[in-house]
Amino acid sequence: MSDFINEINRRRTFAIISHPDAGKTTLTEKLLLYGGAIALAGSVKGKKTDRHAVSDWMEIEKQRGISVTSSVMQFEYDGYCINILDTPGHQDFSEDTYRTLMAVDSAVMVIDAAKGVENQTRKLFKVCVMRHIPIFTFINKLDRDAKNPFDLLAEIEDELGISTYPMNFPIGSGVDFKGVYDRGSKHILSYERGDGQHEIEAIEADISDPSLDSLIGERNRLQLMEDVELLDGAGDSLDMNEVSSGRLSPVFFGSALNNFGVEPFLKGFLEMGPSPLPRECEDGIIEPTDSAFSAFVFKIQANMNKAHRDRLTFMRICSGKFERDMEVYHVQGDKKMRLSQPQQMMAENREIIEEAYAGDIIGVFDPGIFSIGDTVCSPGKSIRFEGIPTFAPEHFARIRHKDTMKRKQFVKGATQIAQEGAIQIFREPDTGMEEVIVGVVGMLQFDVFEHRMRTEYNVEIINEGLPYQYIRWIDNEGIDPKKLNLSSDTKIVQDFKNNYLLLFTSEWNIRWALEKNEGLLLSEFNRN
């Protein structure tokens, strides 16, 4: 049992979140370098080279230099087993990030030192706060001109409502960036530009070292002495209880692109970050050290391997030990099954595994039986974890296929991409799938949908924009939507689970529906 407990305790499962272009994917790759998972960091933008970010496996990601789907990567470092979930930064793909945050125990927030807290950072942070998960902050791009570090810390506290504790503190920025002062060791790590592939050989010096002027300059030394006095005198203390509850964020400064400060950040995070946390289910709390196996589905991805046209379901293990070919119970499907060829990921690269523990993310082949939020567990158990909400889309279009001979491919593609959660598809009652109404959180999702239908399913589609802006699920049991008193520009639709919904062009139409239909219950998201 001690080996079992040790395996769980040495795991760290976290998501990396940020506003686009803050350096999230670059930081992810540098972390992978330390685990030996990759030998060379990819060029994230890919403008002058064929290399691309290793976590961006989807073709459209490589073309545009953005992350549009969460990637799952596992590696070993310094005795720890690390599961990184690299999430999309673009707001149009925020729903994928929301689901991913349900599967982690902590989050790393990457902030651009020149821009500070940006809009998408605020949105993602709110999800972390909702789940009370620990948040670690990496303030990036100190090799460029940056805001005053005290202003950055104040901005995080004011904008996000979380206290901060700088683990290190920068000395200058941009061309005048000289390194960081480590508050724990009271030493300075000087900065020199490198190739970005390995941690820079930093010169370490005590803050009282008389040769410090020659290393960082007299002006920087005097400013640092003043900054350190202010930090030690007025700053918060490092309270790990506050960190664990998500109310205090340890902050690190560095440059991911130049690989300065990344390894100290990794070591600090592994030391302070939580091992797998307990999970709530309908019957109480599931501890990660419970002997019974349990896991939930948080992500489904079709066509990761074009040659096999496969579909993978990603599961977060919550308790127990998983062993290859073990029999499990699929709660929502009410049947026993064996999970075929369990795999762990390095973006699109896969490795068949023999065992996994609480905190690990595994991928299993899925013929179409799983949905996001489903639970699998040891036979004899029936565990249902808290639901993963489906958020209301904000943009709608009528989609149909150009070639009537490709109806089968159209239905398969639209259905599979919808099951992944990348889009939501609806149809009018009593109609087939010759055309569907697609709802998305952001307009860029339409581009991804069209690209994937063309490249993965060989289907050209026609996209006709619709005027609807709001969607509401009908929560009443047994209600006949056709008998509702609705405005003329309100549309009744069904999702692919046959739940009834209403599409509205304005908030006025929502109020009309509620006022004209006594007892009607509408909700903005669905947990089914």
Image (cartoon, rainbow, N blue to C red):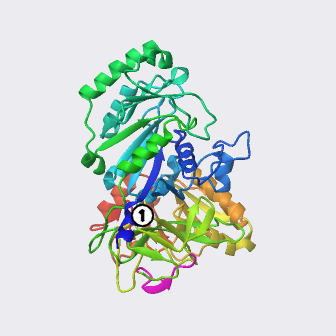
Q: Residue at x 63, y 43 (%)?
A: 44
Residue 37: x and y in percent read 59, 54
Residue 380: x and y in percent read 35, 86
Residue 336 highlighted magenta (yes or no): yes
Q: Residue at x 38, y 67 (%)?
A: 527
Q: In this rendered view, identify the residue nearer to me: 246 or 269.
A: 269
Instruction: Count the labels in the image.
Output: 1
Q: Main SS type for the magenta part?
A: loop
Q: Residue at x 48, y 70 (%)?
A: 495
Q: In this rendered view, identify the residue nearer to me: 483 or 204.
A: 204
Q: In the rendered image, which quarter is residue 511 located in? A: bottom left
Residue 228 highlighted magenta (yes or no): no
Q: Is residue 409 visible?
A: yes
Against 375, is 116 above or below?
Answer: above
List the single residue furthest toward the front.
210
Q: Quadrant of the N terminus?
A: bottom left
Q: Is residue 510 left or right of residue 445?
A: left
Q: Is residue 270 left or right of residue 54?
A: left
Q: In this rendered view, identify the residue nearer to me: 175 or 59.
A: 175
Residue 23: x and y in percent read 53, 40
Q: Is residue 145 left or right of residue 509?
A: right
Q: Secondary structure at mark 1?
A: loop
List the single residue furthest toward the top.
218
Label 1 packing within 10 angstroms: few (<14), some (14-19), many (20+): many
Residue 327: x and y in percent read 47, 84
Disc 1 target residue? 359
Range covered by the magenta-colored residues: 331-341
Given the image, on which type of amino acid does mark 1 rest?
Gly
Q: Is residue 392 visible?
A: no
Against 171, is 435 above or below?
Answer: below
Q: Quadrant of the C terminus?
A: bottom left
Q: In the rendered image, which quarter is residue 228 located in? A: top left
